[in-house]
Image (cartoon, rainbow, N blue to C red):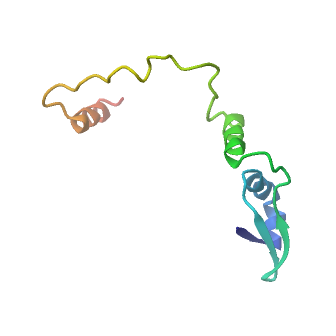
Amino acid sequence: MKKATLTETKNNLSALVDQVRHGETILILDRGRPVARLESVLEGDSPSEGRLSRLEREGLVRRGTGKRPRNLLDTQPPKPRKGASALHELLEERRGGR
């Protein structure tokens, strides 16, 4: 459980409510003594669903709209050439400015 002073709560209420929306409970302190508890009233919402919704609103993720292709995970990844080095390729890519 996270703790916040009365001043922190006043100054950061929106951020604290966002944390509560994602499953956190906030204990509010006045001069070091607990005076209130800020917790979600939405019992059915899972914290991960709230996080996903927030990331979607911010444009950081996009939910899939359909099923994945059936053979997507069935195919084997390509085999590296003999003597190939991932580190060498990464360094070459950096030097090339890509």
Q: Residue at x 82, y 55 (%)?
A: 40
Q: Position of residue 50 (x, y in %)?
A: 72, 44
Q: Residue at x 77, y 51 (%)?
A: 21
User: Does residue 70 sit above or below 44 in this rendering?
Assistant: above
Residue 30 sits in which quadrant?
Answer: bottom right
| Closer-to-camera residue (52/60) | 52
Q: Position of residue 85 (x, y in %)?
A: 20, 34
User: Does residue 69 sit above or below 80 in this rendering?
Assistant: above
Q: How many marks can you see?
A: 0
The quadrant of the image that shows the N terminus is bottom right
Q: Residue at x 36, y 29 (%)?
A: 98
Residue 68 sits in which quadrant?
Answer: top right
Q: Position of residue 72 (x, y in %)?
A: 44, 20
Q: Is residue 91 left or right of residue 19?
A: left
| Closer-to-camera residue (67/59) | 67
Q: Residue at x 49, y 17 (%)?
A: 70
Q: Is residue 73 left or right of residue 29?
A: left
User: Does residue 42 sit above or below 12 in this rendering?
Assistant: above
Question: Farthest left residue?
Answer: 83
Q: Position of residue 87 (x, y in %)?
A: 24, 39
Q: Is residue 95 left or right of residue 81?
A: right
| Closer-to-camera residue (90/37) | 37
Q: Is residue 90 left or right of residue 45?
A: left
